[in-house]
Image (cartoon, rainbow, N blue to C red):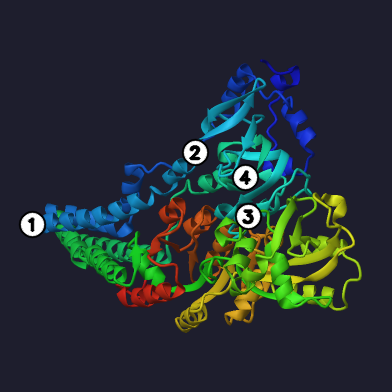
Amino acid sequence: MSVSAPAQSSGFAPGVVSAAALPGDEVLRELGVVAGEGLGDEEVLRRRAQFGPNAVATHRARAFPVLWHQLRSPLLGLLMAAAVASFLVGERSDAVIIGLIVSVSVGLGFVNEYRAEKAAEALHSQIHHQAVALRGGRATLVDVTALVPGDLVELRLGDIVPADLRLLEVTGLECDESVLTGESLPVDKNVAAVAAGTPLAELSGCALMGTVVRTGAARGVVVATGAHTGFGKIAAGLDTHPLDTEFQVGLRRFSLLLVYVAGVLTTSIFVINVVLHKPIIDALLFSLAIAVGITPQLLPAVVSTSLAAGSRRMSRRKVLVKRLVCIEDLGDVDVLFTDKTGTLTMGRIEYMRAVPAGGHGTEAVVRWGLLSTENAARDAQDVGGNPLDQALWRSPAAAGERAALDGYTQVAVLPFDHERRMISVLVRDRDGRSSLVTKGAPETVLDCCVDIPPGARDALAAEFAAGNRVVAVATRPVASATQSIGPEDERGLSLAGLLVFLDPPKPDAATALRRLSVLGIAVKVVTGDNAAVATKVCHDLGLTDAGAMTGSEVDALDDVQLAEAITRTTVFARVSPEAKARIVHAQRRSRGGVAFLGDGVNDALALHAADVGISVDSATDVAKDAADVILLEKDLNVLADGVAEAAGSSPTPSSTC
């Protein structure tokens, strides 16, 4: 079935940020799509020709450019000139030896760099799957590469989002966006438009390519494909050669100095001999011999051998080095940018405490919180995909309430949705008394309560200020004959208390940070998480000067202002992948060696931009391929071991270069 005329003429592809600020109906109108029909076959072909396949165009590792990058070293050029000179003056054995040294040095560099150039190719494997699209009024299973702007796509539990979508219909949808934003909790989605210019991590009305549907279902319209998606822009940023490290820059300067000295001496000696009426051929041969004599033929081989030996020692410290030249820079790192979740914290939500209110006890708050889940089973493994519920059920407090929970029967459930931001459950105890239990976002739960106890709002504000995640629980009695509940029943509630959660710091993270500080490394946190949460974690770990900036504040600064702001900022929160890379670039232009530690697709650009990109063996393939160094454990102590070892493995101090 063909689509209406507007669809045939539309070439508009707004992009996910622009589409998020428009109502869904307007996005469909701009794209020329009929809501219940989707695109027709002819229009799909036309748009595919216009926009190209929905594939991430990544850099392909090519042997000749990598080889040229090795050969363009001034020192190698000097060595090759020395080999030619040796051959001309009759020292053919010296020429062969120098040639072998050059070949070995180029070969070692080529092998390591070519492996690093394979980084972006892994992005293709991340999106190789099929999706359900509505075309011509029929649901059709299509390869994600065949999707075009305007396609209507269905999302279900467990799906990988195949393109950037503007959501049109949502049923309890939550997406795990940690691969792009670093946020540890799934993100609630809805169909409401957001303010223009909203950061990528806060586009609640859109589903982003590469993220995963954790709960619920949805229908959305494709607004960006391939390289135009947030995922694709990361790949496009990898379509460049890694920037030269400080060690490479220093070695190149030293090599150029040798070239200048050799050139000046050779020319001067040749001119002097000619002025003294020496035979020109003899003068030329003598000058070339001087050039050969001052050339450090073994320097490239010594450097490569020293770095290779250091790499072997570091591997015993659980640090694997992909680019040998980064060993020197790892030992000279001055600033480390790192993500928070899983590096400074445990990477999982944990229940902290209950804050009772209105005469309720702590045990009662926990009991009501355990009862208000969509799953009636009394098992932590069966509470669904909500990490907060799972954390509460895993806690020792839950174990103490299991016997009490056996006295309740779940009668009805009003599921959580993103407009109400609450879940309500009708439960009945052994005596036949029924209660409505509501749990959800504190602001909305408090709005449904009456006679809120004095100090409750102050307690909530204190928890937020501490960077904790908070859920409010409220109850009220209902008639015993009640068998069902609706949103209209969520009123006249009595606040029972607050449930407080935290992604706790790692026990040894503070020690690792102190070790890095002793090694002269300043640690700064770059995260997609909430600024208050990240600042609190840093403060708990001893980073007391934890000035914070958000992604929107970073975007508002030019490069000079950003470089200045970095010096007084410890936490960069809610930052996009592009902003992470921009922060790293700004610091590199400022001073000293820069390292970046990350493990998600959202970290790939920054890993690529740093002097030393560091990832872990449990990271996404894209992050591991973009990194120069891989830690076999996601532990800052392992990194500190590697830095200490690298400082002792450096072939020459970079300051001498």
Q: Residue at x 53, y 72 (%)?
A: 344
Judge whether 319 appears above or below 9 on screen: below
Number of numbered discs present? 4
Amino acid beneath label 1: Ser
Amino acid beneath label 4: Leu
Residue 186 is marked as 3
Marks 4/3: CA distance?
13 Å
**How far across and down, in percent of the image, does residue 656 sit?**
36, 75
Kindly indicate whether the residue at mark 2 contacts the one at mark 3 (C-beta within 8 angstroms): no
Residue 93 is marked as 1
Residue 138 is marked as none
**How far across and down, in percent of the image, does residue 265 sit?**
27, 65
Circle nearer the viewer, 4 or 2: 4
Check the image and name the residue furthest to the front. Answer: 431
Q: Residue at x 43, y 76 (%)?
A: 637
Residue 57 is marked as 2
Kindly indicate whether the residue at mark 1 contacts the one at mark 3 (C-beta within 8 angstroms): no
Q: Which of the marked residues, 4 or 1, is nearer the chain's N terminus?
A: 1
